[in-house]
Image (tube, rainbow, N blue to C red):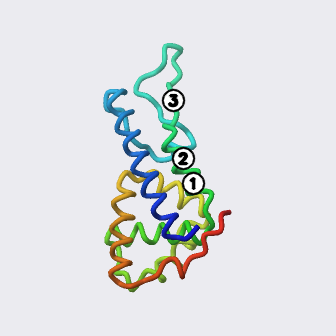
Amino acid sequence: MKFSDVLSQVIDLAKKANAARAQRARTTGGFPAVTSGVQLQGIQAPGPAPSGSPVMLPPVPEESALCHFLESQSSETVYMLTAVMYLGRGDFDPGRLLDNYTLMGERFGDPRWAARQMADKVSLPQYLEEGWRRVAQANIDLDAMVSTVTA
């Protein structure tokens, strides 16, 4: 699978996760659509359960699918996805993509942390789409740069 295919799939999965999060928020009276670590821990519903212990809502399946897909990618792929996300957010210019890609490994240390951080961002699909657009405008071939062998 080419990097562009992975990128497209992440965007699609993130949009599906956002739709499921929005539905969950509607059915739980606006309780958070996403919370840090939601894929691993579930989210705590407001107020205690009748027994006095908090109620944990499990992640929606679409969130889990996004997180698991991201975590199944190679370190190189996860760090480039993260760099493209930050590019799309406007953190740097396309000419600095490789520099920022290198920083992702240093910043996160473990690609699973980068994957989880991306999976928790509601704006992930917009950031990735904008980053991809900016990469294309700069004539950068991500498929030639990134090996997408799964971890």
* Residue found 52% across the figure and 39% down from its top: 61
* Residue found 50% across the figure and 25% down from its top: 54
Quarter of the image where one finds residue 88: bottom left
The amino acid on which the numbered mark 3 sits, given as a three-letter code, is Met
Closer to the observer: label 3 or label 1? 1
Q: Estimate the spatial distance between the alpha carbons at disc 1 and disc 2, rounded to whole Å.
A: 6 Å
| Dot 2: element | helix
Side of 115 where 46 appears, left or right: left
Q: Estimate the spatial distance between the alpha carbons at disc 3 and disc 1, rounded to whole Å.
A: 23 Å
The amino acid on which the numbered mark 1 sits, given as a three-letter code, is Phe
Write down the residue under mark 3: 56
Q: Which of marks 3 and 1 is nearer the N terminus?
A: 3
The amino acid on which the numbered mark 2 sits, given as a three-letter code, is Ala
Q: Estimate the spatial distance between the alpha carbons at disc 2 and disc 3, rounded to whole Å.
A: 19 Å
Q: Do the residues bearing badges 1 and 2 touch, measured as CB atoms within 8 Å?
A: yes
Write down the residue under mark 1: 69
* Residue found 48% across the figure and 78% down from its top: 142
Residue 122 screen position, x and y as percent: 37, 51
Residue 80 screen position, x and y as percent: 51, 72
Write down the residue under mark 2: 65
- For this orientation, the residue located farthest to the top is 50
